[in-house]
Image (cartoon, rainbow, N blue to C red):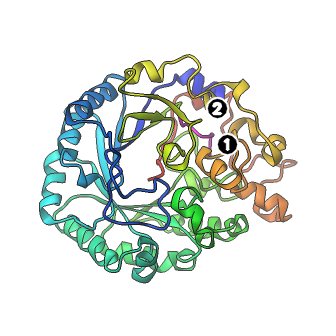
Amino acid sequence: MLPVLQRLGYRPRFCVWELTLRCDLRCLHCGSIAGHPRPNELSREELLRVAGELADLGCERVTLSGGEPTLRPEWDEVARALVGRKVGVNIISNGWGWTHATTERARAAGLSNVAFSVDGPEQSHDRVRGRPGSFAHVISALDDCVASGVPVSVVTHVNAVNLPELEAFYADLQARGVGAWQLQIGTPTGNLAKHRKLVIRPEDLLELVPRIAELRGRGGRPVIHVADNIGYYGNYERQLRDRGAAICFWIGCRAGCQVIGIESHGNVKGCLSLPSQQQDVDEFVEGNLRDASLKAIWQRPDGFSYNRRAEGLKLEGFCATCRFSDICRGGCSCAAFGFSGSRFDNPMCFYRVAVENERWDLIPDPERDQGPLDVTADDPDATVVLDDVHPIG
């Protein structure tokens, strides 16, 4: 599928932007190890300059993230600058300090939606958030936005605690008027690397994926979106990713191809979820916006080579021999690195786990058909319409 992305051209269509690392919670699963702001975070003037550079490069959607982005006083000014350049903007908040005044600021800034991080029912949420009352705060914020007519989404990381509760939690979100629900797997980087008992196992995918597919099949709201670290290529792939696009299956990680991440001090990565300085990892940092423009970093000939260049895709282990390797390219870069220490060997893959557990009933039969893959890399339509990217928040 890399040739398809190359024909489309590399453009940062989707950006997740960490406005600050400051946060008022200390979550057990936080990949960013958020808490205190970085000592050298971008100034207001630098933030607005970068917003203009994103618009100039044709960015279509920016997610304002953190830390807790609303702790950066200029968050809505940045949003307005982007919206004024026809860039769609939303924000991800933990809801702790959210008030009705914040709701009104979000509305005035023209946000497409507000996404709240909620990790299951009250007991499960407060446990991983590390602060009693955090569930009550975020639900109050969510309800205020819904009552005020501001579109609301919820982002949930799936862990060993909330795994049994997804159906009940879905019903609660439905009753509250939530428009969309993004599910993602908690990846053992950052804080979660120290709390491995919270991390689901690869074999849990054999239960999780069919359950998500069943929930999506119910239709209605909230619409369920799976993040890029859930899948791939089992009999449920179409049910997980079909949103009416020409391609309704995983086409490989687009970090550095159509997705970009910006850290609060100006470091640029292909995806904000990839580890960097906070985790003592530097291989995914492509440059800093104080040293070069976003355009220069994005267009650097040898940039983002782990995803852009065929010679950089050195798949390992099962991924190297998988029959979907040329399309999948090792799955989500962050998940692969977090679970195996290698960008190119991903144990959190539904197809892989089904094969390793001889669950042939859960995967397509190569002797009969390709299952969910009814558009190929050689199909010209595949270069025209691609499904949206749902970045890991």
Q: Position of residue 32 (x, y in %)?
A: 46, 53
Closest to the observer, 218 or 208: 208
Give left or right: position of 260 versus 136.
right
Q: Position of residue 367 (x, y in %)?
A: 88, 48
Please name the residue shown 35% across and 80% down the image: 132
Amino acid type, residue under disc 1 in the picture? Arg
Q: Is residue 234 among what the camera can see?
A: yes
Q: Position of residue 155 (x, y in %)?
A: 42, 61
Q: Earlier in the sequence, mark 1 or mark 2?
A: 2
Q: Look at the picture and state if 26 lies above or below 278.
A: below
Q: Secondary structure at mark 2?
A: helix
Label 1 with label 2: CB-CB less than 8 Å: yes
Q: What segment is highlighted magenta in the picture?
A: 250-255
How many marks the image carries: the answer is 2
Please name the residue shown 45% across and 56% down the image: 33
Task: Please identify the residue farthest to the bottom as the structure is shown.
Answer: 123
Q: Which residue is mark 1?
A: 343
Q: Which residue is mark 2?
A: 306
**CA distance separating discs 1 and 2:** 8 Å
Amino acid type, residue under disc 2 in the picture? Tyr
Q: Position of residue 13 (x, y in %)?
A: 42, 33
